[in-house]
Image: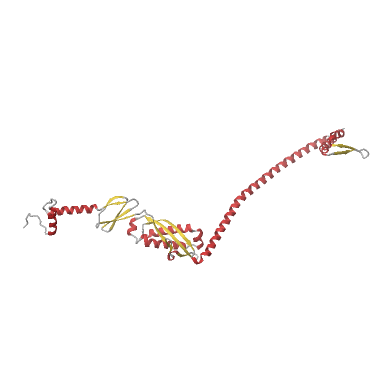
């Protein structure tokens, strides 16, 4: 029933090709053996096609029979080639950007016009920079995460933050706060939707009232700036004047204290001197009176240009040069 004959193939076309090849290359006469070699070569080429390289800043998401398998980082790797395995190499560290309310130099009013907390309308344009922190979630757990989902999350977050603040805060003093709160809210929503996206920076590009009321708001902004300028000038003047005033007040106080100490010392000395004279006076009244009189005359007479002494019948006139003679005569 069975024999040991080699299997014969009826692929006449393939046999003809092999026969033509044998004219130039010596091949075994057994076509089955040749088919095995060709098959092994094909398998080797197929397996070799599974070698791939991931560059720095990239990651590769590997799928086996269409189902996620693993993530490979930078380097040389091998994975089952198609159709058994598939790989998606994504630049995860590349900073991507999204523009809300504008595209280049063109405004998009449908995205930019928002209602503030005090029911005014503001034109807000936002630039978002982001990258990928979880490749599996980014590729397989959210629909168009870097496109439609990211746009919806950005617009929702900015509208919610702007809608909680009055228009003056959004236009002037609270821009940094709006950016910070928008970034936090965006990241929480992106994590909730499993997008695998990390928000790097949120920057308000242009925040202004609608064109119809632009002039009125510009006047308000200029008035606020003038107010701040005047306040700063007043603070600078205060910082310049107050130290000088405090220094002058301290000097006046020190001078008063010094004058007080001087007057007290002089008064104490005068009182002590008077007490000493009084003591001497009580001991020798006539002598003390004469000495005090002569000391007074010594102080007064040198200041006079002419001195007139004597009784009404005899008048003696002395110049300031012979005052000492007069004083001597009086002492006699």
The answer to whether residue 182 shows anywhere in this view is yes
Residue placed farthest to the front in the image?
24
Question: Residue 290 falls in which quadrant of the image?
Answer: top right
Q: Is residue 319 left or right of residue 134?
A: right
Quadrant of the frame with the N terminus: bottom left
Residue 287 in picture, x, y percent from top left: 84, 34
Residue 37 in picture, x, y percent from top left: 16, 52
Question: At x 58% / y 54%, what residue is drawn?
Answer: 233
Question: Residue 188 falls in which quadrant of the image?
Answer: bottom left
Q: Is residue 251 above or below residue 298?
A: below
Question: Residue 229 falls in which quadrant of the image?
Answer: bottom right
Residue 43 in picture, x, y percent from top left: 20, 53
The answer to whether residue 11 shows anywhere in this view is no
In this view of the protein, which residue sits in the foreground, 183 or 92?
A: 92
Residue placed farthest to the left in the image?
1
Q: Is residue 180 left or right of residue 13?
A: right
Quadrant of the frame with the C terminus: top right
Question: At x 24% / y 52%, what residue is drawn?
Answer: 48
Number of callouts in the render?
A: 0
Residue 172 in picture, x, y percent from top left: 51, 59
């Amino acid at each position: 029933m069975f024999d040991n004959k080699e299997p014969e193939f009826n692929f006449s076309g393939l046999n003809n090709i092999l026969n033509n090849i044998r004219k130039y290359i010596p091949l075994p006469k057994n076509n089955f053996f040749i088919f095995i070699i060709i098959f092994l070569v094909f398998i080797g080429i197929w397996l070799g096609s599974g070698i791939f390289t991931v560059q720095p800043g990239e990651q590769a998401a590997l799928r086996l029979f269409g189902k996620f398998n693993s993530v490979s980082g930078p380097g040389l790797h091998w994975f089952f080639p198609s159709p058994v395995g598939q790989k998606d190499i994504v630049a995860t560290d590349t900073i991507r950007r999204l523009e809300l309310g504008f595209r280049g130099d063109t405004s998009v009013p449908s995205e930019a016009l928002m209602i503030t907390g005090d029911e005014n309308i503001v034109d807000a344009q936002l630039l978002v920079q982001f990258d990928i922190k979880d490749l599996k979630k980014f590729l397989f757990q959210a629909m168009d995460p870097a496109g439609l989902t990211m746009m919806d999350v950005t617009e929702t977050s900015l509208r919610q933050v702007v809608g909680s603040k009055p228009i003056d805060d959004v236009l002037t003093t609270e821009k940094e706060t709006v950016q910070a709160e928008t970034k936090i809210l965006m990241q929480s929503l992106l994590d909730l939707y499993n997008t695998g996206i990390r928000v790097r920076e949120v920057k308000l590009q242009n925040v202004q009232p609608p064109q119809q009321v632009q002039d009125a708001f510009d006047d308000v902004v200029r008035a606020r700036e003038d107010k701040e300028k005047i306040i700063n000038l007043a603070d600078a003047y205060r910082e310049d004047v107050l130290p000088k005033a405090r220094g002058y007040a301290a000097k006046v106080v020190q001078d008063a204290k010094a004058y007080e100490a001087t007057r007290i010392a002089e008064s104490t000395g005068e009182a002590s001197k008077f007490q000493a004279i009084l003591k001497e006076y009580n001991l020798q009244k006539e002598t003390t009176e004469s000495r005090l009189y002569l000391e007074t005359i010594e102080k007064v007479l040198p200041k006079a240009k002419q001195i007139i002494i004597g009784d009404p019948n005899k008048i003696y006139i002395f110049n300031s040069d012979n005052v000492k003679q007069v004083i001597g005569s009086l002492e006699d």
